[in-house]
Amino acid sequence: MPNPSHYCQFIISMFKEQHLELKDVAILAEIHQAGTCNQNHIAESLNIESAHVSTGCAKLENRNLILRRPSPRSTREILCSLSKEGEKFITRHSKAANKNTP
């Protein structure tokens, strides 16, 4: 089990590097876990309002951490996935957390 203080340092480093809020990191983690998903899935999984997901996704997209595109199934549905930069970001912080875990 990871050392909680190291895990907290991992989360804090993500916040500081990209000036993210907790909700943004949760959204990023959910997209990472799901692969490609729509914003409703994120809202339901995290139990947060879809408006907060939308603003969080816009922030993450502006920082080039995720990609958003219309779904081929519905013009109203937006699909989210990690960008190459988002993949690197998650990998970098995951390695740092694992490195600091005894």
Image (tube, grey):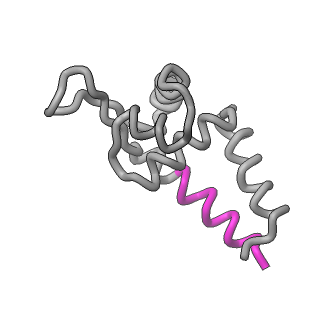
- Residue 46: give x, y in percent of width and height: 55, 41
> Residue 101's spot in the image, x, y percent?
75, 74
The residue lying furthest to the right in this view is 5
Q: Residue at horizontal 62%, vertical 66%? A: 95
Q: In this view, does 80 lie above or below 34?
A: above
Q: Which of 14 and 45 lies nearest the eye of the viewer?
A: 45
Which residue is situated farthest in the left direction here?
Answer: 72
Answer left or right for 15 relative to 58: right
- Magenta segment's dominant SS is helix
Q: Is residue 15 left or right of residue 42?
A: right
**Which image quarter: residue 4?**
bottom right
The reply to whether the magenta stretch includes residue 36 is no
Total marks drawn? 0
Residue 82 location, x and y as percent? Answer: 41, 45
Q: Which of 55 and 76 is in front in this view?
A: 76
Q: Residue at x 51, y 32 (%)?
A: 60
For residue 68, which quarter of the picture?
top left
* Left/right of residue 72 with respect to residue 30 in the rendered view: left
Image quarter where the N terminus lies is bottom right
Q: Give the range drawn in magenta.
A: 89-102
User: In the image, is residue 54 above or below residue 98?
Assistant: above
**Image quarter of the C terminus:** bottom right
* 90 in magenta: yes
Residue 24: percent from left, percent from top: 60, 35
Which residue is painted at 40% across and 40% down in the image?
Answer: 41
Q: Is residue 73 above or below residue 11?
A: above
